[in-house]
Amino acid sequence: MKELLLVRYGEIFLKGLNRPYFFRSLVRKIRYALRGTGAKVWIHDGRILVDEFEDLETVIDRVTHVFGVHSVCPAVEMPKENFDAICAQAVQMMADLTGTFKVEARRSDKRYPMLSPEINAELGHRLLEANPGLKVDIHTPEHVLNVEIRDQAYLYVRVIPGVGGMPVGTNGNATLLLSGGIDSPVAGWMIAKRGVQINAVHFHSFPYTSEQAREKVLDLARKLSFSCCGIKVHIVPFTEIQLQIRDHCPEEYTTLIMRRFMMRIAERIARKTDSGALVTGESIGQVASQTMEALNTTDSVVEMPVFRPLIGFDKSEIIEIARRIDTYELSSLPYEDCCTIFTPKHPATRPRKEKVAEAEAVLDLEGLIERALDQVEVVSV
């Protein structure tokens, strides 16, 4: 008999002939997540199993943060031939529990002498005899004793939810415009959950934005990097561009022109990193630069698709996800980013692309972009 962790996956089941590709990718990501723990990840009979670990709770925490993992179950593996031993182990696992329960047996080995309903009935009977604090409820039980009869018997009670989604990298690469705010880390997490490997671009306007603001963004990237299996953050110096916009462009267009520069620079970095799309944290109507007309104006300067996972979310919904993925407290630290400096008093909310393009034409667009790209710092987290 030995203890192990049974890893369950969900959406991969739907992938038909492509399932092995997604399955192998998920196993690689789990091994990446468990590096340094000494745990062994192996595949047996269509199951992903983890054993040889020292700290079960650490292993559970790491594996449940891997995109593609539906749930994990701390289980006991034991010989299936001795049914009395299986019953004794079940009694031990349920000894401290009270309330309602049911037994759910699955018999993959069709040669096993007992049918699943027979296993359910006999195990349930012995559990009731051993623990008077339990009673049967087959419809809405508080506890479920799962018994899987394969080449061995596997017993488990706890089912800990994972993040779900798809293994990172199975659906291409994208570049996230990462600020120090609440929204963009959530957007990055959501697009990565769909199997997209992300890298990030951050615009830093020193000395108007501090070193603490820069470190805050890197800390946010570190929060994301675990589930994303590492992130490269491209830190772009943005001070010269913002000063030129402030000094030479109409005030009502400064935010839009700034956003257009960001999109152009992010697209160039994205193409160098083999990304197929840009990702932003915008939600329609949340601020002046996120009206439909404003978003259309900023998108018009790039050819690459722009994904906005939060486009229809309320702020309260975004905050709820940020709390769940543990980025909210970091995002709330009072360090300004470049989007909050030189903010116009009356920004244009329904801009015309032609007017904005005319307003920015006074700038040396290509020269400013090239100088910023020449000074990009890349940090791997």
Image (cartoon, rainbow, N blue to C red):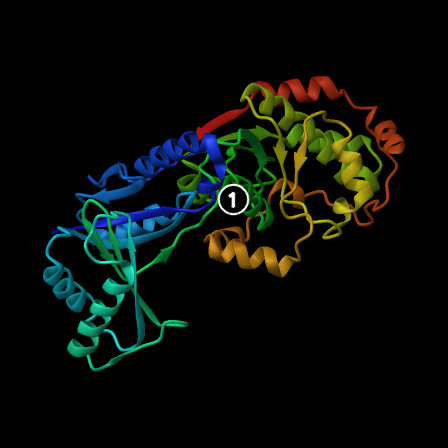
Residue 242 point in image, percent of width and height? 70, 33
Eyeballing the image, is 102 above or below 17? below
Viewer-closest of 51 and 199? 51
Viewer-closest of 65 and 268? 65
- Taking the image as shown, residue 380 lies to the left or right of residue 91, namely right
- Taking the image as shown, residue 144 lies to the left or right of residue 214, namely left
**Which residue does the numbered mark 1 point to in the structure image?**
189
Residue 79 point in image, percent of width and height? 13, 50
Residue pictured at 37% horizontal, 36% vertical: 29
Residue 32 point in image, percent of width and height? 33, 35
- Taking the image as shown, residue 40 lies to the left or right of residue 335, namely left
Residue 113 point in image, percent of width and height? 19, 54
Q: Can residue 246 be seen in this view?
A: no
Mark 1, secondary structure of its residue: helix
Residue pictured at 19% horizontal, 39% vertical: 38
Viewer-closest of 377 and 249? 377
